[in-house]
């Protein structure tokens, strides 16, 4: 009979120890989540191109018509332009065609609400050359009114609108070889 109280004490102590261990485990597991709730959170970014290209006119006063497909309000866009020569060698468009100068950024800072179509125009930007091969308008980043940002990752651009010179009746022969500049 003397073993029963001892068993009870041992079992009771084991239960208390198990409960404390369980409580300690729960507390340790919840600490990172409690800390994580105090950090700023940003909305999820669109996984695909946030715009749809609808029309492009590369001639005098270059313009592009886009539709906002992101589900958010866009407050800023930046595009790069690449030009193809007659043999379809691609080159990023630098300011005044001077390779020692930076790639020209075609920026847009007017609001485009979700689903809205808008024509963006850059006065004096003539990108169409009679004997060239064509070109590409490439969206490199978009800023949304909630502070989130979509950016093209390095490598082959995914958010691109191509055009070709009217002398190329069948369009571009080769797919563009574009790696985003650093």
Image (cartoon, rainbow, N blue to C red):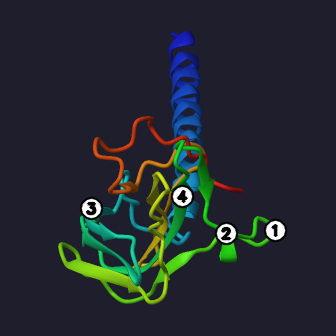
What residue is disc 2 on? 94
Q: Residue at x 44, y 68 (%)?
A: 128
- Alpha carbons under labels 2 and 1: distance apart: 8 Å
What residue is disc 4 on? 83
- Alpha carbons under labels 1 and 3: distance apart: 32 Å
Question: Who is closer to the viewer here, 41 or 173?
Answer: 173
Residue 85 visible to an observer of this rendering: yes
Q: Earlier in the sequence, mark 2 or mark 4?
A: 4
- Alpha carbons under labels 3 and 4: distance apart: 21 Å
Q: Earlier in the sequence, mark 1 or mark 3?
A: 3
As displayed, is residue 52 above or below residue 90? below
The local secondary structure at tag 3 comes to: strand
Residue 145, image x and y in percent?
39, 82
The local secondary structure at tag 2 comes to: loop
Q: Earlier in the sequence, mark 2 or mark 1?
A: 2
Is the Cβ of the residue at disc 3 closer than 8 Å to that at disc 4? no
What residue is disc 1 on? 100
Residue 81 lies left or right of residue 72; in this view the side is right
Question: Who is closer to the viewer here, 46 or 140?
Answer: 140
Depth check, mark 1 against mark 3: the one in front is 1
Is the Cβ of the residue at disc 2 closer than 8 Å to that at disc 1? yes
Q: Earlier in the sequence, mark 3 or mark 4?
A: 3
Depth check, mark 3 against mark 2: the one in front is 2
Is the Cβ of the residue at disc 2 closer than 8 Å to that at disc 4? no
């Amino acid at each position: 009979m003397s073993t029963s109280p001892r068993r009870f004490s041992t079992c009771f102590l084991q239960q208390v120890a198990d409960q404390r261990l369980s409580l300690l485990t729960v507390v340790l597991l919840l600490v990172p989540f409690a800390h994580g709730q105090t950090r700023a959170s940003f909305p999820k970014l669109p996984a695909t191109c946030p715009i749809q290209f609808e029309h492009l006119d590369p001639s005098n006063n270059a313009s592009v018509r886009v539709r906002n497909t992101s589900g958010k309000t866009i407050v800023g866009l930046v595009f790069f332009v690449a030009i193809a020569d007659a043999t379809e060698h691609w080159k990023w468009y630098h300011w005044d065609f001077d390779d020692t100068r930076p790639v020209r950024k075609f920026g847009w800072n007017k609001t485009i609400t979700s689903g809205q179509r808008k024509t963006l125009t850059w006065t004096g930007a003539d990108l169409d050359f009679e004997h060239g091969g064509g070109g590409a308008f490439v969206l490199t980043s978009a800023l949304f009114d909630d502070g989130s940002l979509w950016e093209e990752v390095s490598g082959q651009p995914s958010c691109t609108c191509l055009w070709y010179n009217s002398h190329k009746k069948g369009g571009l022969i080769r797919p563009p070889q574009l790696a985003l500049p650093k």
